[in-house]
Amino acid sequence: MAPTILIVEDEANIRKFMSVNLAVRGYNVIEADNARDGLAQLQDIRPDLLILDIRMPGISGLDLLDIISQAPDVPAIPVVVITASEAAADRMSASGNPQIVEVVMKPVSAPQLVEIVAKALAES
């Protein structure tokens, strides 16, 4: 069975870019356009990997990461953090959160995305 990846990203063009590039490589991809929808998806499915944008309106990706890290009913899911903010990338890299397997700066290329996802899944 192909790994399932949940992409939580508020920018539709970036979300679709990632989704299409991963789906054509055989991954099951589920999308959420905000953290609240991402959390709802996590209550219904158990993805093998979460790709999470940090800066989103409403609940931020950082808030979502805190919520799922503390939720007893949500198993630890490896997380690839994507962000356009160097400060946020530095903060996430230094956070020590064991669920974060990679922090990536936007924009990300298709080959880079595929490589990061394969590596993250192999390490989990």
Image: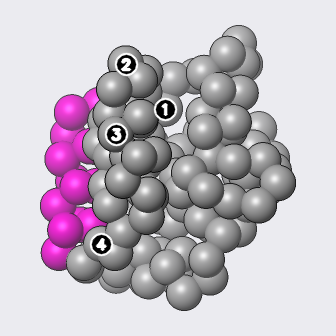
Disc sitting over residue 96 in the figure:
2
Near-viewer residue (61 or 17): 61
* Magenta stretch contains residue 120: yes
Residue 80 x/y as whole percent: 39, 47
Compared with residue 112, is residue 8 higher up or lower down, i.e. above or below?
A: above
Q: What's under tag 3, amino acid-wise? A: Asp
Earlier-in-chain disc, 3 versus 2: 3
The tally of labels here is 4
Q: Are marks 4 and 2 in contact (CB under 8 Å)?
A: no
Disc sitting over residue 108 in the figure:
4
Residue that badge 3 annotates: 90
Earlier-in-chain disc, 3 versus 1: 1
Mark 4 neighbour density, 10 Å: few (under 14) some (14–19) many (20 or more): some
Spatial CA span between label 3 and label 2: 11 Å
Q: Which stretch is magenta?
A: 111-124
Question: Predominant secondary structure in magenta?
Answer: helix
Near-viewer residue (62 or 13): 62
Spatial CA span between label 1 and label 2: 15 Å
Q: Is any part of residue 4 visible from this angle? A: no
Say left or right for 46 vs 18.
right
Give the position of the C terminus as an image quadrant: top left
Disc 2 element: loop
Mark 3 neighbour density, 10 Å: few (under 14) some (14–19) many (20 or more): few
Q: What's under tag 1, amino acid-wise? A: Ile
> What residue is shown at x 41% (from left), y 23% (from top)?
95
Residue 41 x/y as whole percent: 73, 50
Earlier-in-chain disc, 4 versus 2: 2
Residue 122 x/y as whole percent: 20, 40
